[in-house]
Amino acid sequence: MFKAICISISISFFLTCEDKPKEEEIVLPVVHQYTSYFTGETMDKKTSPKGGVCLMGGSSEDDNAMRWFLNQSDGGDILVLRASGSNGYNDYMYSDLGVTINSVESIVVKNKDASYDTTLHRKIKQAEGIWFAGGNQWNYVNYWRNTPIDSLMNVGINNRNIVMGGTSAGMAILGEYIFNAKNGTVTSEEALGNPYREDVSIDSLNFIDVKYLEHVITDTHYSQRLRQGRHVAFMARLVKDFGVN
């Protein structure tokens, strides 16, 4: 105990006797509003993606459909966007399916602030394929609509022909019209009983511009959650409210 006290005093004395250290610029680390999980080659690879859209209804992924999605990227970089979960897609896409791609990066966004992160913007600009994981589609709509994120994704679709895809909530946001789940979910019985319930929230505002899905509203987990009926209610709303035919 005595030695420790003596050492502490001598160090303090030494520091007070020395000239004060020169002031240095303090560079704070950049705090991103997302978590990144990266697998593959770190150098960006520019390829010639073949475009298209891959829709999965939820539950387990279909391996053949995912192989198609990866092949459409032409060996490029895949960006997985999500608002929950972690790196479940990384090894699956990069090594489990036998399709050669340059990299997979899963980005888990924490809030809307992530939409203004320039590093995330760069990742979207470099992606040849973007996959939306499941979760809550309202998070995706709320975080990304009318931000640089949806603008950059649409530039990728229209100017670079990137391939898009999603499962569950990630599929729900890909149609021109969206059941956005802003007010929670709704059952088939409820939606058919009253298609204008508050929780039958049909969204017609611009978001992700997938040219193959004009005048379309998707729905997911069809058999597992018996959603055929509510999808009929959604489509009836499109005809009645928006003149889709």
Image (cartoon, grey):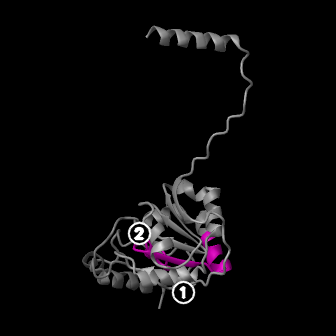
Q: Is residue 226 left or right of residue 178?
A: left
Q: Is residue 176 magenta?
A: yes
| Image point (39%, 68%), residue name | 181
Along the line of sight, the residue nearer the viewer: 121 or 23: 23
Residue 115 lies, with reference to residue 156, above or below; the image says above
Q: Which residues are magenta?
A: 152-179
The disc labelled 1 sits on which kind of residue?
Tyr
Using the rendered view, name the quadrant where residue 45 is placed: bottom right
Between residue 245 and residue 14, name the one nearer to us.
14
Q: Nearer the viewer, mark 2 or mark 1?
A: 2
Point 39% across, 77% down: residue: 61
**Image spot of residue 188 (x, y percent):** 28, 78
User: Does the magenta-highlighted stretch encompass residue 101?
Assistant: no
Amino acid type of the residue tagged 2 in the rendering: Gly
Q: How many marks?
A: 2
Q: Residue at x 43, y 11 (%)?
A: 1
Residue located farthest toward the front when viewing the structure as drawn = 3
Q: Which residue is mark 2?
A: 134
User: Which residue bears the numbered disc 1?
Assistant: 212
Q: Earlier in the sequence, mark 2 or mark 1?
A: 2
Residue 241 visible to an observer of this rendering: no
Q: Secondary structure at mark 1?
A: helix
